[in-house]
Amino acid sequence: MIRTPLTQRLGLKHPIIQAPMALAAGGKLAAAVDSAGGLGLIGGGYGQSDWLEDQFRAAGNNAVGCGFISWSLAEHRDLLDKALGHDPKAVMLSFGDIAPFAGKIKARNIPLIAQVQTVWEALAALDQGADIIIAQGAEGGGQGLKRATFTLVPEIADNIYRLGSQAILCAAGGIADGRGLAAALGLGADGVLVGTRFWAATEALVHPNMQDAAIRATGDQTIRSTVMDMARQRDWPEGFTARVLANDFIDKWHGREAELAEKIDIIIPQYQKAWEAGDIDMANVFVGEATGLIADIQPAAEIIASMVEQAEKIIRKQQGFIQ
Amino acid sequence: MIRTPLTQRLGLKHPIIQAPMALAAGGKLAAAVDSAGGLGLIGGGYGQSDWLEDQFRAAGNNAVGCGFISWSLAEHRDLLDKALGHDPKAVMLSFGDIAPFAGKIKARNIPLIAQVQTVWEALAALDQGADIIIAQGAEGGGQGLKRATFTLVPEIADNIYRLGSQAILCAAGGIADGRGLAAALGLGADGVLVGTRFWAATEALVHPNMQDAAIRATGDQTIRSTVMDMARQRDWPEGFTARVLANDFIDKWHGREAELAEKIDIIIPQYQKAWEAGDIDMANVFVGEATGLIADIQPAAEIIASMVEQAEKIIRKQQGFIQ
C-alpha cells in the first residue's frame, strides 16, 4: 500500500482518484473505484439532472463523489444542490471560475477538489480554499489547456509551499499505470487523478467500439481539437481543446472550423447518430496520450491493484540506483 | 550517486546529458558538464563550421560530444566528419532521418544518441541501431513536436522491451531539477537530457537579458510557435514548432504567419539586431515550461550536484510511502 497525505485526508486505501469524465463515469464505475480503495467521482457532465440522479442511485451505498464542469454548472446551479443532497465524499470543479460554488461546498465540510490547467488557476483555486488541487496536463484525454503534467505539477507544488498552504496536490494527464503513479509522486504530487485508464474499464459507460479503438492506438494518434465539441454542441470557452483519437472526422474538419460552422446543422445529427452507433470514423474516441499504454479493458479494481503494485515495485527498484 | 544503465554505458558519474542547444551550448558548457560527471554535448547548430571548431577547442581536454539537427546536417554533411575528427564522446542526432549518418557514427564505435518526438520515430531510430533514445516531450524548450514526456517515455520503454532491444532510454522535456530526474526514472527512463536548466547556466552562450527573463517567468508564459524561426530564417520542416517565452513579437505575429511572410525582408534584420542586443520584447527567449522551476543562474556543476542530491532525497522519501 502507498500512503500519502491524500490517502490520509480522504481516508482512502490508495492515492488514486478516478476522473469524473462526462458521460463515461457513471455510478457503477465510481462505486467500483470506491470499493477498490480509491476515490470514485461521478461525471456531473453538462447539466443532465435525471442522469446524475440515476448515477448516484447506481453507486448504491458506496461513498462516491461528483465532479462538475464549472462553466456549465454556472448554467445549471441546481445540479450542485442535488449532488450535495447525496452527501458526496468530495466535489470536484474543473474548467472555469470556482468562486460561485466553493463557499457552498466548504460550508458543508465536503472536500473541495479543484482541477486546474495553469499555475495562475492554481493560485485562484488556493485563494478560494480548495482542499485538493489537481494539476492537469494537456497530454490528458478530453478537455484541457496547454501545460504539461511534467512541469505543471512541480511548479504548483512550489507555489503551495511558498504560500504555506495545506492543500494537497495530485497530478492528472498521462497517468495510466504504476509508472505514472511513481513519477507523479517523484514530481511532488500526493496522488493521481486517472481518466483514460478508467475510461477503458469494464464499468465505464463507453461504447465497446471506442474502447477497442483505444487499446489498439498509440499516443501518437491523439490530437487536441475543437471540432468534436462543435459537432456535439458543447460550447466550451475560448482556449479549451479536447484530446481525442484522430479519425476521418478530424482529418476532414480540423483546421477548417469556419467551414464546419457553416455546415453544423447537417453535421450535428450525423455526429449524434455516429456516437450512438459507435461509428469511430465519425464520432471521436475521447482519450489521452496514455491510450498508448493501455492494452486491455479491465475492471476498475484490477486497474487500481496493478497500478499500486507496479508503483511499489518501481519505488523499491529505484533504491538500488542509489550508490 | 545515482547509477543506471546510462551511467554504466557511457562511463558517467550521473545519469544526466546536457542538451546540445544550438547557439547556447558551446564548448565551455559541455566541458563543465563533463567535469561534473554528466555528458556534455556541443550544439552543432545550423552548419556553422568555424563555430563548431571553436567550441571543440573551448572544451579543451574534456571528453565532450556533439549534437546535430538531422535535416540541417543533411545540407552540411562535412560537419559530421569534422565532429568525428574530434573523437567525440557521443554524437546525438535530432529532428529528421538519421539513416544517412547512423552508419558512419556506429562504424567509429561512437555511441549514437537519437532524440525522437514520437513512438514512430523511436522505432525508426532503433531500426538504425541507435544506442540511446531520447524521448523528448513538447514541454521542452526550442524545437519539438506534440507528444508529452509523461506518456512518451513509458510508451517507448514498452516498445524497447517488446523488441528485445538493448537501447538505453532517456527522458527530455520539462526536466530541470531532482524531481524531474526522479520522475523520469519512475517512468522507466535510464537518465535525463536537460536543456533549459543548462541554458540558464553561467557557462551557456546566452544573453544575460534572456536569462534574467527566464528566471522571472512561469511556465504558463511559454508558447510553441513558428514565427521566430521565420524571422531567423531557419527553415524547419512542416510540423515542428519551438517553445519560447511569449513576448511582443509573439503577440503580434503568432497566428498571422502569412502576413509575416510578406513582410519578412524587413523583419529579418530587425530580429537579428534585437537578438544581438538582448531585446527580449522582439527576440525570443528559447526556454521550455521548466523555466517556471528555475530561479537562478548557476554553474553547471552546481546544477548537476543539486539535481542528483534532490533526486536521491525523493527516492529515499518515497520508501516511506510504502506501508
Image (spheres, coloured by chain):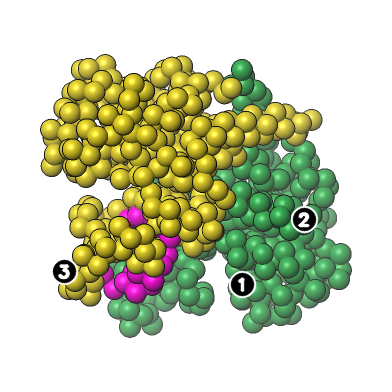
Chain colours: A green, B yellow
Whether residue B230 can be seen here: yes
Point out the frontmost of discs 2 and 3.
Answer: 3
Q: Mark 2 lies on which chain?
A: A
What residue is rendered at 38% in x and 82% in y?
A: A265
Q: Quadrant of the C terminus of chain A?
A: top right
Q: Is residue A271 above or below residue B36?
A: below
Q: How far apart are marks 3 and 1 (CA)?
A: 42 Å
What residue is rendered at 63% in x and 55% in y?
A: A156
**Of helix, strand and loop, which one carries label 1?**
loop
Which residue range is magenta in the image? B241-258
**Of helix, strand and loop, which one carries label 2?**
loop
Whether residue B225 can be seen here: no
Q: Residues within 10 Å of mark 3 (few under 14, many from 20)?
A: few
Do tag 3 and tag 1 residues touch (Cβ < 8 Å)? Answer: no
For the residue marked with disc 3, what is the amino acid?
Asp
Residue A8 x %, y % = 82, 45
Instruction: Choose between B280 and B148: the one closer to the eye.
Output: B280
The residue to which callout 1 is attached is A96
Q: How far apart are marks 2 and 3 (CA)?
A: 52 Å
**Of helix, strand and loop, which one carries label 3?**
helix
Which disc, if any, is residue B265?
3
Instruction: Choose between B195 and A226: the one closer to the eye.
Output: B195
The residue to which callout 2 is attached is A164
Q: How crowded is mark 2: few (under 14 residues within 10 Å), some or many (20 or more)?
A: few
Point out the frontmost of discs 1 and 2.
Answer: 2
Q: Please determine if labels 2 and 3 lie on a single subunit.
A: no
Do tag 2 and tag 3 residues touch (Cβ < 8 Å)? Answer: no
What residue is rendered at 35% in x and 55% in y?
A: B242
